[in-house]
Amino acid sequence: MTNLATLRRGRKSFEQRAWAESYRLLHAADRDAPLDAEDLERLAIAAYLVGRDDDCEAFTARAHQTFLDNGDREGAARAAFWLGFALMGRGAIAPASGWFARSGRLLDEGQLDCVVRGYLLIPVAIKCIVQGDPSAAHATFSQAADIARRFADRDLASVACHGRGRALIRLGRIAEGAALLDEAMASVIAGDVTPLVAGDVYCSVLEGCQETFDLRRAYEWTASLAQWCATQPDLVRYRGECLQYRAEVLQLRGQWNDAARDALGACELLMSRPMAGAAFYRCGEIHRLRGEFTKAEEAYTRAHERGRKPQPGLSLLRLAQGQIDAAAASIRSVLLDTQALISRARMLPAAVEILLAADDVAAARAASSELSEIALAFDAPLLAAASAHATGALLLAEGDIEGAATSLRRACETWRELEMPYEEAQTCLLLAAVCEKRGDQDGRRLEIETARRLFKQLAAAHCLTRIAEQSESASHQRIGSLSERETQVLRLLAAGKTNRAIADELFISEKTVARHVSNIFDKLGVSSRTGATAWAFQHNLI
């Protein structure tokens, strides 16, 4: 095959988004004869999308130099920007800043008014977000949007649109921000933007969904990202991010096996990138929920090594291990070190659970109140359910049974609507405790059975074991509180005998039987012979 034929096939593969084939053919053509600047840009993009970061940077640098040699300052500035963008994506901030500066200098020296100036505003806006100045970020993204409109550049328009949305979310204007994220995604789905921009917008929009606890949008856009990746089998870039986001969605929906598979795949694909920490944290969460505590600790350690603080998972792990003091000390420390509102919202539900276990009701009350305020501000069902669950647990501990029941019912309904079975099961266990306090043994049994069914679906063996242990403990406590004569009366009552028949069989008066039955009702927390009979069957007295 001639070099020209190879080059043409490489370009065609590029247009067809067959990235591995395009990379192979363009690279082969470049070995035969150096490519021109535009083809070097194509080769660099193909290398980027198949995960060859070093090659991408080398080819982009060559494209930059070739543009310079040809006297094309705008092309050289564009290549310099994308090289900085690639470096920034893998955390090489200082080299990225150098290339951004070079791009700007080339434009200034040539007094060029072009779309590249709009692209150079993107890292400036991102820096404003990182430094906690979303107002400046929004203004900068808006300037980029104006430039995109002036030069009819769809890529820049999409990036600027989603960037404005992210900034508005940070400013508390969540509905406006979410609308802009959807608008940016509409361009991506319509195929109006290049794959390089599409992948970054996808990932950033999903981060925005996480920031706003918008689970429904996260479900939809994660499915869309997975489909987008599937249409490009050679795509390596963004596949790890896709698996990372999908693992979280699958975990929340109770599909733990699939979530574990995707989280592990994300760890492998993102090993050398900043998001690897988040992938290892997700692995730790799944292991913790499954009761695989040693594996969870290992995953949390690896997450920490890659810059992702393993909280609140690590504190919840200590609680599950029975190390209540360690869990409480850990979560208190986390709350002291966590200032950002969104980050605190992720810690507070765990804080309430752990602090109540540590009998620190005052601190749990403060955490629950703060969570309620944040949930009200965000108006997100996920946060509302977490807040209602935490409030219900707190009220139960404080003895406000009716208030606890109201909050917990609300939480349970929302978990069910969101299709989050683990959280629903945990709330059912608290509702069972409410029924226990009310003396409603039938209600208690139904809530426990619902929790047991959900845990079976999840294959959460350690949760099922905990339910069994608690039921056995409660059974022993109840049976121990009945006198020997009351136990005899309960067995006969459960067999369907009347007070007269029981009196005759035990050679006692009917009045004495009535007193024993009343005492049994009080001790078992039931209000009828049917309830007492059901309890006797549940506890194998028949």
Image: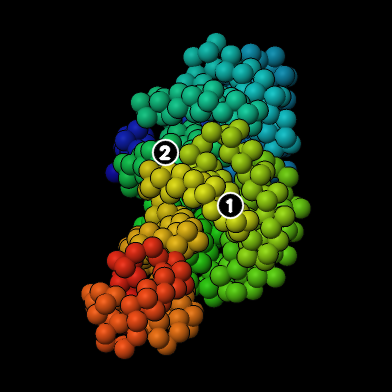
Q: Looking at numbered disc 2 in the image, what kind of residue is underneath it?
A: Arg
Question: Residue 129: horizontal and vertical position, in percent?
Answer: 68, 33
Q: Nearer the viewer, residue 403 or 349?
A: 403
User: Is residue 329 left or right of 390 when viewed as pictured?
Assistant: right
Crowdedness near tag 2: few (<14), some (14–19) or many (≥20) residues, C-alpha within 10 Å? some
Looking at the picture, does residue 171 appear above or below residue 43?
above
Question: Residue 160: horizontal and vertical position, in percent?
Answer: 56, 24
Looking at the picture, does residue 136 appear above or below residue 421?
above
The mark nearer the N terminus, 1 or 2, is 2
**Which quadrant is home to the C terminus?**
bottom left
Q: Residue at x 73, y 30 (%)?
A: 133
Q: Residue 529: give its label.
A: none
* Residue named by callout 2: 216
Q: Nearer the viewer, residue 4 or 438?
A: 438
Q: Residue at x 68, y 51 (%)?
A: 365
Q: Is residue 536 visible?
A: yes
* Residue named by callout 1: 400
Crowdedness near tag 1: few (<14), some (14–19) or many (≥20) residues, C-alpha within 10 Å? some
Q: Is residue 70 visible?
A: no
Q: Nearer the viewer, residue 148 or 32?
A: 148
Indicate the quadrant where residue 85 lies.
top right
Q: Secondary structure at mark 2?
A: helix
